[in-house]
Image (cartoon, coloured by chain):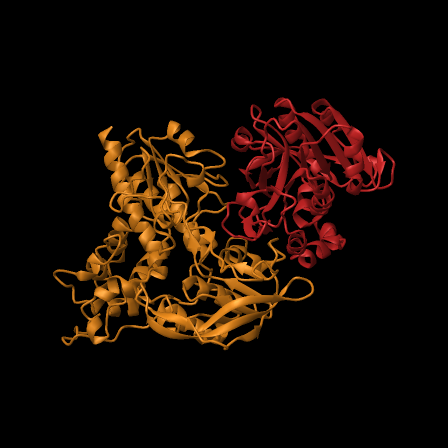
Chain colours: A orange, B red
Amino acid sequence: MSEPKPKKVDLNRRGMPKQLPEVRRHNFNEVALGYPVKIAVEEAERCLQCKKPKCVLKCPVEIDIPGFIKSISDRNFTAGARILKQKNCLPAVCGRVCPQEEQCEEACVLLKKGGQIAIGRLERFLADWEAGQGELEMPKISPFTGRKVAVVGGGPAGLTVAGDLIKLGHQVTIFEALHEMGGVLTYGIPEFRLPKAIVNREVDYLKKLGVKVVKDFVVGKTRTVESILEEFDAVFIGSGAGLPWFMKIPGENLNGVYSANEYLTRMNLMKGFLFPRFNTPIKNHKRVAVIGGGNVAMDCARVALRLGAETRIVYRRSRKELPARLEEIENAEEEGVVFDFLTLPIKYAGDENGWVKEIECLRMKLGEPDSSGRRRPIPIEGSEFTLPMDAVICAIGNSPNPLISAVTPGLEVGKWGNIVADEETGKTSMERVWAGGDVVTGAATVILAMGAGRKAARSIHEYLSSL
Amino acid sequence: MFRLITNQMIVPNIHLLTLEAPAVARQMKPGQFVILRAEEDGERIPISVSDWDAEKGTVTVMVMNVGITTDRLASLETGISIPTVVGPLGNPTKIEKFGTVLCLGGCYGIGSIFPIARALKEKNNRVFTVIEARSSYLFYWEEKLRKVSDRIVHITRDGTKGYRGHVGRLPEIIKSFQEPVNRIIINGCTFLLKRGSDVSRPLGIETVVSLNPIMIDGTGMCGVCRVTVGSTTKFACVDGPDFDGHQVDWAELLQRRKTYMKEEVIPHRTSRCEEHARKS
């Protein structure tokens, strides 16, 4: 404490302790262990406290980043947690799964010198510190306005809307289709990247604020949006991107070919890795291929690896084009996932019992950049080869879940099956109905869904206040 | 939580369960299903619905005791609550005035064909109900079915009631009606659905089958229930469960249904005496 602050800018971005690769590849415990207090304070002290902080502009939920970092360097963690929660109802989640390198940390003025502040790690530190203090501090709740809001989907977008509106005094009910809250945080992201205890903690916090939760309730099936509108003043739809894509290549319906959603749901929501204590079965595959290069593909590969399989990522472009976060790619590499770059599966072959046994692939080369700005993969003629495999996980993306839009005639739908909603307000084509998150944008990130939820909550509040 | 009001073994190994699920009962239509979990650590399984009471808020299902979850369900005491009853899922069976409709049910399908037959009767169809079982002692709900059917025909493998044999006897049965059948609707095990579709194809009668593949969420999210119909992949949970039986790729469906046979049925078939002894 008595050490004088160094005058020179400290560019030493503090690392976060992690479980060692050879240890963690055999367990489902969290990989990254979080900053100890001392390191967190050191990291926070590096922040230049810019007068016009660019990091805040790049945050989808506009967190006062220099503010909470200052609190850490002042060792006033209570104040810091309060600053975080003003703008973010899920800081422990965002500190772990936000792509900070493309957002706040990318805007940090120290980036040029390679010493950008580890904003995500500091956010996580504060959220975890607060959780460790026992009773969470309750925010001020405005008096009940007499207005009722229904939130469809208990994922990041819905949780944000619920958190914002309950504080403003509205009554909020979340309808969740599955038997657990959290949406993709629960069924999608594995335990070792986002422990479910953290998701439960955030949901419990909302319940304590007065949010009502109805699980096992499929809006569109158990009750229509129209019927919900008879009882509620406004409806927010945040039903996510839950329609898995397949490649439409021969053999895709063989046993042992999974969508990433199925594989991850079995593992995360249904706790298949604890079979038979939990009843949802999984197979002990020996050789697993994951098709795709995003965060979901990394998650699938790292789950399969932990279950003892020799695991490969099969990706049609090169390492440089992988859409996953660098941190997750490195984690996967360290743990021993093998990467087959510039490889395109064209066919799955099965054994006599209908189980996949090998993938036929083509080698690719990179051509000119396509509309996404990444170099387009081009097949190399005559380069066919096979990979022997007893399971394949297809992690090439998801579309918005069409279940609600299919039974709600007033709701305008875009060409990808997404619900059309105003980018700034989340308003849909239907009176008193808002939407946000992956069901509007297609599969994106947790924080963007939360950002959309925040904007929708603001617009819903304006509407309810005008009544 | 969803309270179990009735649990009755209606015939050997088939349990009639009535559950309190008011929101589900209010929306239920013939041909839809629910997903249940028997306990907190339990898996999610899809079950066809055999009846419901929107006023009382109850749903009735027939559970055949074949795997881990159906075994747990079968052994539940009434009054107890189970953690999940979600639905109604899937699309309702198409019900309109078709003329003469043959409703074929086997195993749990004897139950789930009942609301379909009832709805068809309400639309003034002539309803011929054919029920199939291994032996006569495995029939149930015959009185209920009789009330909504113009005729009722039995098939037993051992010949103890009605026609002897399997659903392969369907063409003769149809012939014996001496009037044209405009549509066939089948509920029951995959083998019954397949065989029924096989024998109705040469007769050129449109045949609707209610498929029962493995599912997890039941809302189109996981894709484990995919089936090939015609030449396209469909998700049985949201595109079905009813499909044209003449278009279904049965070999693929039967094989996909066996995915977890080893994990599921084999451990279940061991006695688990030790576990029971510990519990009691």
The residue nearer to you, when weighing B152 against A463, is B152
Q: Quadrant of the C terminus of chain A?
A: top left
Q: Is residue B180 visible?
A: yes
Q: Position of residue A133 (x, y in %)?
A: 35, 54
Q: Position of residue A459 (x, y in %)?
A: 25, 39
The residue nearer to you, when weighing B82 against A151, is A151
- How many marks overall? 0
Q: Quadrant of the N terminus of chain A?
A: bottom left
Q: Is residue B234 left or right of residue A415?
A: right
Q: Is residue A20 visible?
A: no
Q: In terms of image quadrants, where is residue A78?
A: bottom left
Task: State the residue at coordinates (56%, 23%).
Answer: B55
Task: State the residue at coordinates (31%, 34%).
Answer: A170
Q: Position of residue A380 (x, y in %)?
A: 45, 76
Q: Is residue A225 above or below residue B37?
A: above
The residue nearer to you, when weighing A334 against B107, is B107
Q: Is residue B61 above or below residue A379?
A: above
Q: In terms of image quadrants, where is residue A373?
A: bottom left
Q: Position of residue A174 (x, y in %)?
A: 40, 40
